[in-house]
Each structure stands twice: as structure tokens, then as C-alpha cells.
Amino acid sequence: MPPRSPLPKPRVYIPHPQTPPVPRPPAAPYIPRPATPHIPQRQAVERVARQVPVQPLGQQTIPTPKISQQTVMSPRRTPPLQRTVHQGAAPTRRRSGGFNKWLIIAPVLAISVVVMSVCAALTLGVVFIYGSGVLPKVSTAGVALGGLSEAAAADRLRTEWDSIELQDGERTWAVNPVMLGITLDAAATAKQAYEQGRGTGSPIQAILGQVDVPPVISIDIVTAAVTLDEMASTFDIAPVNAGVRLVNGTVEATPPQEGRMLDVVRLIKRLETNVAAEVMDGIIDLPMRVITPTITDSTPLLAQAHALLARPLLINAYDPIDNERYNWSLPPEEWGRWLTTAGTSSGLTLALDTTALRNFLSSRQQSLSGAQYVDISDATNALQTAIANDSNQAQIRIYHDDLNHTVQPGETLITIAWHYGIPYPWIQQANPGIGDNLSVGQNIIIPSADNFLDFPIVPNKRIVVSISQQRVRVYENDQLKWDWVASTGINSSPTWPGVYQIISHEPNAYASNWNLWMPNFLGVYRPVPGQDFVNGFHGFPTRGGSQLLWTNNLGTRVTYGCILLSSENASQLYNWAEEGVVVEIQA
């Protein structure tokens, strides 16, 4: 094998610490070369070794570097790195100071892929499970439809969507949508719910979140307006005027309170614009208007209130039919909480809280017996009038409801009417078509005696007539004032028992049926409803202008239904009994 050509001599720059700088050609000015860094011999050898190819052992020729002026390399134009290399120290590798961003990106990508895979798998799984049903988190108008088929969802909507909640803050009312003219298309709504997450919307939201599908709804706006107008008072809160109250024996002013009123027009416009959006969650928020109280300062009435609250509130409830009295008393600590103010044409005045007063009267009414009841509105007005007039006492009236009677064997219309003290034509009027023949077990209405008490009751006067005793007894302040002999009607034209009152005064009344003039006539009752014919008290009558009748018949039944007194007694009664005095005629 021919011998290899010798290796080219490498150009090696090994500066010596004491090598002087090479001068420039004479033509140029002398510029000394900057000192070159000292490179140890070992490093220079290693650098050359890296450039020399390896030869087989025996053929390797190790060149001997020669340092001459021709082999000197010019220094680099860029300044050399200024590193301090200690003699005999091992070479040091440079470490990279950069940050590897893939250390963050890779885990994030991995997590994202896992999450997306899980969501996709979950979505596919749920869709597979709910393949023929509404996705699990879908509802409409407050009705959950998840898991139901389209037909079952429509059925549930028809069954359960029977109530809409009307809401004002924490106050709520349940109302049937039909009352508001609102109709739900259950089939169309169920179809929209089924498409949620399939054809429309996000399946993730329909599976893991919550989706409220707008219901398909129509509304009859006229029906809605009528119903809301009728129900408006249910939602309203009346404003409270500044008032006064008793606190630990001291009268102090109370602040006013704003009221709230339903804005019906505004709500109707909202429903007409987008009724589906209004009822999508099954709740309609009521728009309310704030009502400012009329009276905001009650300090001018503190002295008057102090005087009133020094005494209890007395309520005298009188039953003129049964002649019973109920006295209800409230201590100042209780009724003082009701005291407020009211504006009248004459200025500011004290009043009672209407709601509290009505609640109290309703509770007292429950303690009454039988058919008795209190007219809450009349009683409230009577108490308000008393307080406005600086009085702590009020008189109220107890009424009686109509009664139901079941006909017993042997009873007739006349006997029933006599028993209840109601003229039988009034019973016939309350039971149209009843006739004179009754059957056992038949139910008939007995009208209340309050039908005969048209005038305000005079509570401290009462006249009692006894048919069986033929007497008239007159009472004042529950004390007997007069006790007179009298005469009542004959059997064919009887004086009818019952509770009536003085309804008229005529100095000399004329009865055309019998051609009688009756002096000092006091009208008491009408035997036939709607007729002008009246029975009452009178003195000895005359006929033909001169003939005086029945002067010797007192104490026996001689009249045609009236109550006969002596002319002297009739005159006394005429002047004593004003209209409204109760007359009780006993059988």
C-alpha cells in the first residue's frame, strides 16, 4: 500500500507572553498591535488535535508546530472575550440561562385534551341515554322536563303548568294562568325543549348547566287587564299617615310609611310585548308605584291624643232585636297602637288604623251567637267618628242574618210567620212561588227582622207591646217609664208580633179602608212589603168626623191591626218616641 501523503501543517497561533507586536509596513505609521490574550500551551494543543484526523498507529506523524512570523494570525477585529483562565484549571462549559416554555404548554395542552375528551364522552353518553328524551337540565316556565320524551313533556306541561306566581319582593300570590288569559302551547313548547342541545343551544349547558326554554304562549290581553284590575287591591299596600302612639305612658309621634300600588297599565304593556319572557321562569314580577302618605307630621295632635289615651276605648254593641248589649273595652296600651291621623275638610284630625280596627271587630264578631253579626264597615265608621270628635266611646249595632226553616208536620205559613215574628207576606216575598201549601221537609227562608229597622236605632228607649196581656210598657234607659192598658188587632186582622220601630209621625192619620181618623198616629210596620199601608199606635179614632170609637174597649182586641191607647197616653207617646225607637210586639 503506498504511503499516505503527509498531513498538512495546521496553522496554529500560539502567542508567547513576551512576543513583541509585529510592526506595520514602513509606509504606514506605526500602530502597535494590542496584546493578545495568553493561551496556555495545553489548550493550543487540544485545539490543533481537534483539527487533525486520526491515523493508524505507526503511520501517525505528529507535526511539530513552528512559531514564525508567517504563521502568526492577525487578531480579530472584535474585541476578545475577557475571561480569566487560571493556569492548570479545567475548561468550564457555559450553561444556558433560557426558560423552556414547553414545560408549561405541554401540561396545559394535555389537561385540555383530557377535559375535552371527558366532555365529549359525557355528552355522547348522555345523548345516548337521553336519545329519545329532553336533556337533563332543560326546563320551561318553572317545569323541569329533563329525561322526558317529547310527548311526555307536553303532557307534564299540560298537567303542571296550572299556576303562575305573581311577586312583589317577598310577597307572592299563586294565580291560574287562565285567569290572566294566558294559554300555553304544550306541544310546541315540548318540541323546543327536546331540540335544546340537539338542534339549538349548547348540549354541555343542557347537560351540566341549566337551560330555561322560552314557552310558546299566547295571551288574551283583555282578560288579563280585567283580572289584574279586579285583583289590584289584593296587591296594594295603603300608605300610613304620621300618627301618634302611647309608649310607656308617653304619647309620641309616629313616622309616616309609604304605600305601594300595582301599576296595571305598565304590567299589561309588558305582557303584551313579550308574555313568553315574562312567564319563562313561572314568575311575574309586579310593577308597583310608591304612594306617598297624605300626612307626614302629627306633632300638632299630641296634646289631643294625650287626653284621649288617658282612658280606655269603649265599644257598646247593641242588638235591637234581642235587646242585648255587649261592652267591649280596650286599654290605652292596646288601642293606642291604632291611633293615627287623617286629613279632613276641616283639617288634620285623629283617627284609628282601619286595618287594625277591622281585624279587632272581626275577632269580636266570632264571639257572637246564632245569626248575629257586626257590619264591619258601619262599625268602623262609627268608631272613626267618635275619635274625630274627641270621644273614646262608640255605639255600634249588631244585625241578624236570614234564617232557614225546615217545615215540620202540622206547620203552615201563618204559624211559621207568627212563630218567627215576621208578617207572612214578607216570607212569601223571600220565597217566590211558595204559595200557602207547604210540604213537610221543605226548606224556606225566614227574612231577618232587620228588614223592619230602617232608621238609626235609639239605644236608650224601647216600647214593648204584649198581645196576650193587652199592655204597652215604655222603657227609658232600661227603666220602666209607663205601663198602659191597650188593645190590639182582631183575629181576622191581627197585630203581628215582631221587632219593629217608630217610622212616622202623623197628627191625625186617615185609614180609607175603614173610614177612620186616628189621632197621634205613630207608624210602626208595613204588613205587606212595598205597600203604603202601615200599622201603628194611635188614640181613640173617629168615623165621619164625630163618632168616637172603642172608648170602652181598652184591654180587648178591637182594632184592625193597630195598637190602641187612650188619647191621653197616645199623645204622651207621640211626643216622647222619635223615629228609630224600637217597638217589640210580643205574642
Image (tube, grey):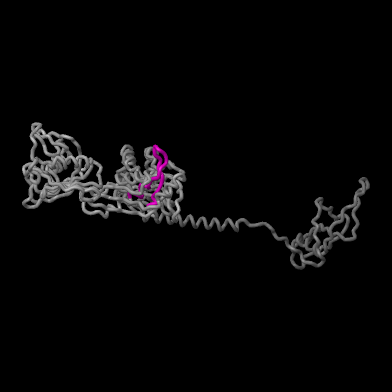
- Judge left or right: residue 218 versus residue 509: right
Regarding residue 289, the answer to whether it shows in the image is no
Q: Position of residue 346 (x, y in %)?
A: 40, 38
Q: Position of residue 219 (x, y in %)?
A: 33, 40
Q: Which residues are magenta?
A: 335-358
Residue 406 drawn above or below residue 51: above
- Of residue 516 and residue 122, the one placed in the foreground of this image is 516
Which of the 4 image quadrants contains residue 292? top left
Question: Which residue is most to the right?
Answer: 26
- Of residue 510 and residue 543, the one placed in the foreground of this image is 543
| Residue 344: in magenta span | yes
Which of the 4 image quadrants contains residue 582? top left
Q: Position of residue 516 (x, y in %)?
A: 10, 35
Counting every numbered tag in the picture gives 0
| Residue 119: in magenta span | no
- Of residue 420 and residue 265, the one placed in the foreground of this image is 420
- Of residue 373 and residue 398, the one placed in the foreground of this image is 398
- Judge left or right: residue 407 versus residue 213: left
Which of the 4 image quadrants contains residue 272? top left
Regarding residue 221, the answer to whether it shows in the image is yes
Q: Position of residue 183 (x, y in %)?
A: 31, 42
Tell me the residue at 79%/56% (across/down): 81
Quadrant of the image containing the N terminus? bottom right
Question: Which residue is most to the top?
Answer: 544
